Image (cartoon, rainbow, N blue to C red):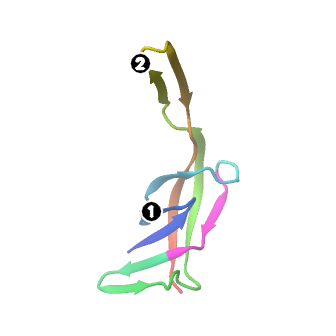
């Protein structure tokens, strides 16, 4: 069984036991989170599609940790003008462990 959920403007394919990195969510490590925006459920041969989401379906998850991703370097350069700008960015994320998928 797996589901497609939407959080932080992105979609993720999740199954029980998976660990995913999503945009930062509130909650301490070890806290339980419910993702209610389930777009699709697949249970063997049975496929349920939402319009746009499935009412009553949810995905239970546990917050593993909050961290920041690897540094992304942004380098701006104008030739012959002595213009250089170097900026680094680290996007914060939340790691979630999927515990259960609850169908409608």
Q: Look at the numbered discs 1 and 2 and tell me whether their residues touch, using CB distance below 8 Å.
A: no
Report x, y in % for residue 20: 47, 54
Instruction: Look at the image and say whether residue 11 sits in the magenta stretch.
Output: no
> Relative to 25, does residue 55 appear above or below in the rendering?
below
- Where disc 1 sits, the SS reads strand
Q: Residue furthest right?
A: 27
- Residue 61 badge: none
Q: Quadrant of residue 58?
A: bottom right
Please name whichever residue, 69 or 17, is drawn nearer the observer in this view of the structure: 69
Q: Residue at x 57, y 68 (%)?
A: 60
Residue found farthest to the front: 80
Which badge, 1 or 2, is on the more N-terminal residue?
A: 1
Question: Which of pointers 1 and 2 indicates the residue nearer the eye?
Answer: 2
Q: Is residue 62 above or below residue 75?
A: below
Tell me where residue 93 appears, x and y as whole percent: 57, 45
Residue 46 lies, with reference to residue 24, above or below; the image says below
Give yes or no for residue 32 being in the magenta stretch.
Answer: yes
Picture quadrant where residue 87 is located? top right
Q: CA distance from mark 1 to mark 2?
A: 41 Å
Label 2, residues with CA under 10 Å away: few <14, some 14-19, many ≥20: few
**Residue with the mark numbered 2:** 79
Left or right: 40, with 44 as reference point: right
Q: Where residue 90 appears, x then y in whole percent?
A: 56, 34
**What is the span of residues highlighted in magenta in the rendered image?**
30-38
Q: Which residue is mark 1?
A: 12
Q: At x 43% / y 14%, what residue is drawn? A: 80
Q: Nearer the viewer, residue 8 or 104?
A: 8
Q: Secondary structure at mark 2?
A: loop
- State the image coordinates of residue 10 (x, y, percent, origin top left): 50, 60
């Amino acid at each position: 069984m797996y589901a497609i959920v939407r959080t932080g403007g992105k979609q993720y394919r999740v199954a029980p036991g998976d660990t995913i990195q999503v945009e930062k969510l509130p909650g301490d490590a070890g806290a339980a989170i419910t993702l209610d925006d389930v777009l699709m459920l697949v249970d063997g041969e049975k496929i349920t599609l939402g319009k746009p989401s499935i009412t009553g379906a949810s995905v239970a998850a546990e917050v593993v940790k909050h961290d920041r991703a690897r540094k992304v370097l942004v380098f701006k350069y104008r030739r012959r003008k002595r213009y250089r700008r170097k900026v680094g960015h680290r996007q914060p994320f939340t790691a979630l462990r999927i515990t259960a998928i609850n169908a409608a």
